[in-house]
Image (tube, grey):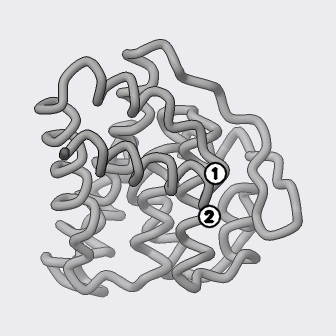
Amino acid sequence: MRKWFYRLYLRRMARRYDYDTSYLFELLDESGAAFRRFIRIQQLGGSFSGGAPRNAWFAAGIAGALVEDCGPCVQIGTDMAVEAGMPPAVIAALLSGAPTDSEAQLGFDYGGALLTAAPELDTLRAEVERRWGKKALIGLTLRVMTGRNFSILKRALGHAQSCQKVRVGTAEIAVAHRAKVA
């Protein structure tokens, strides 16, 4: 009965976001228990914002997918951010390396620095905590971590695709090399 529900959920997700969920079906078919654990990790960790501003929180998740170089994961993260009210122009600027909203930029820069162990990580961590508090720092961190999990699972199962262009609204944005490595 559960597998039927999960299959319905994955088909709806695929249609809603024009996203290839074949790797998730593969996980579900191989092990329902592993699928449930993976989804639970994503839901529990990836939904806690800790009071971080919306744009910073979504930007951190997008950075997580970008560091893993998974175009479809960046695309779905972008689509979800737009759906939740993040302005497409802010996302386009982040992806192209242009200056943008300072909250989103801080979340994006923190996410990239965290996953690449960049030299500026300590400075960015301190700035996030100064602006929004320790709970928001934790929220951004969990979002970054869960933002990369889909990419890692896809790569492990042989479904990964690299990032080239991302559709933001009606525009296609070429991801700046600087944005990819944060």
Which residue is drawn at the image coordinates 26% and 76% (left, top)? 49
Up/down of 37 relative to 135, above or below: above
Total labels: the figure holds 2
Which residue is drawn at the image coordinates 19% and 23% (left, top)? 31
Q: Nearer the viewer, residue 78 or 26?
A: 26
Q: Residues within 10 Å of mark 1 (few under 14, many from 20)?
A: many
Residue 100 screen position, x and y as percent: 67, 77
Q: Which residue is mark 2?
A: 79
Residue type beneath disc 2: Asp
Residue 9 screen position, x and y as percent: 39, 54
Which residue is drawn at the image coordinates 50% and 66% (left, top)? 59
Work out which residue is located at the far front of the displayed protein and give it.
Answer: 1
Q: Is residue 31 left or right of residue 92?
A: left
Q: Is residue 100 left or right of residue 66?
A: right
Image quarter in which the N terminus is found: top left
Residue 73, quarter of the rendered image = top right
Q: Are marks 1 and 2 in contact (CB under 8 Å)?
A: yes
Q: Nearer the viewer, residue 27 or 77?
A: 27
Residue 130 screen position, x and y as percent: 25, 83
Q: Is residue 130 left or right of residue 97?
A: left
Q: Residues within 10 Å of mark 2 (few under 14, many from 20)?
A: many
Q: What kind of element bears circle 1?
A: helix
Which residue is drawn at the image coordinates 74% and 65% (left, top)? 92
Residue type beneath disc 1: Gln
Work out which residue is located at the far right of the displayed protein and give it.
Answer: 171
Q: What kind of element bears circle 2?
A: helix
How far is the residue under mark 1 from the one under mark 2? 6 Å
Q: Which mark is residue 75?
A: 1
Residue 158 screen position, x and y as percent: 48, 13
Residue 7, quarter of the rendered image = top left
Q: Nearer the viewer, residue 72 or 18?
A: 18
Up/down of 62 relative to 160, above or below: below
